[in-house]
Image: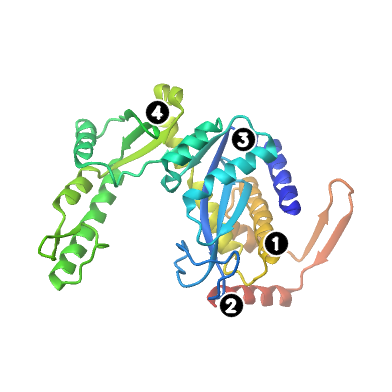
Amino acid sequence: MVHQNLAEKIAVQYATTNYNFSFALVFYDVSTLYFESFTESDLQKCGFSKDHKHGQPQIVIGLLVNELGFPISYNLFEGNTFEGHTILPVLKDLCARHQIKTLTVVADAGMLSTKNIEEIMGSGFSYIVGARLGKISLNKAINLHGFFNYNPDHERYFIECSPYGTFVADYSAKRAKKDKRDREKQLEKANAKIKDNTASHATKFVKITKKASYTLNEDLIEKAQMMEGVKGYYTNLDLVVATEPKLVIDRYHDLWHVEKAFRMAKTDLLARPIYHYKKKSIETHLLIVFIGLCVSRALEITTHMSLARVIALLWEVEDITLVDPKTHESYSKRSNKITRELTHLLSKLKTLY
């Protein structure tokens, strides 16, 4: 924990100095890292796996980044922790360690709940979160469709008050085409399952009748059709919504930086699977990944190259000298070609097995 605090302190200082970072705006998301094991323990628990490794234990990682995707802080949770239960502990821990008074957090719809929103607002924080539109009524879906359908090519925003704060919705013709394709595929799958008598409650657009048979849910199909191209957001930034609702939407779309950070950690930095079992070893593994992610993102921002490209170029470096900027001490290392090739081969084998 001491080393994690020190690493995060250095990361915040670097982001503040080089990227004008302040805690006024942070982006939060969670992901999972699975273990090369099938045995649960204190941290390693089976849960909803974003790596599609549902039979293997995992841990849940909460990551905070700035608007450039540079890592600021991370937290570790048990593998069966629901992602919506992570955001409050993360924000409270961040606030306590950095004496934060003003903060706006951007997070996806998985963090949305009345309790979360109330506690975030009670702590004096602001938020922008994605809206779960799957549970809205058919009548509201029809109203939203009508609102946007009058001027589908004109930039318009639907705004109203709600229990979760101000609700903002926008429409995208490109998104509508994708939603339509998805709906048609799901409808085709539902019809096939009904015909083969293999449908279940989990089948999209299917409902059970009084005769204990499955049929198409026409209301749900109509609602999905009405909602094609529409996406919603909740925020308590009322002044921003009143003057520039597009800013709320743009900030939410910047969440892709967190998703990219997780992809970099899992693929380029080989953060998964985890082979450790003791809690201290697991925490050390995550600390190394976090530091590697900070260095990697700084390299990407500075060089305007992808991390994969940077790593490919580094393999060609024969000599490297590390200099401590404070003590001016230097350490040189000559990279052996055979060692490099062997390490590269082992990395490939690790990803395969």
* First in residue order: circle 3 vs circle 4: 3
Task: Give the alpha-carbon distance from disc 3 to disc 4, as whole Å.
Answer: 21 Å
Q: Name the residue located 23 percent from the left edge and 66 percent from the top edge.
A: 200
**Residue wearing tag 1:** 284
Q: Is residue 192 left or right of residue 47?
A: left
Q: Name the residue located 70 percent from the left edge and 61 percent from the top edge.
A: 284
**Residue wearing tag 2:** 349
* First in residue order: circle 1 vs circle 3: 3
Helix or strand or loop: what does disc 2 sit on? helix
- Farthest residue to the front: give it: 210
Residue 65 visible, this orientation: no
Residue 84 percent location from the top left of the image: 47, 49
Dot 1 crowding, Cα within 10 Å, few <14, some 14–19, many 20+: some
> What amino acid type should be assigned to the residue bearing mark 4?
Pro
> What amino acid type should be assigned to the residue bearing mark 3?
Phe
Q: Name the residue located 25 percent from the left edge and 45 percent from the top edge.
A: 228
Vertical placement of residue 250 versus 282, above or below: above
Residue 275 percent location from the top left of the image: 62, 72
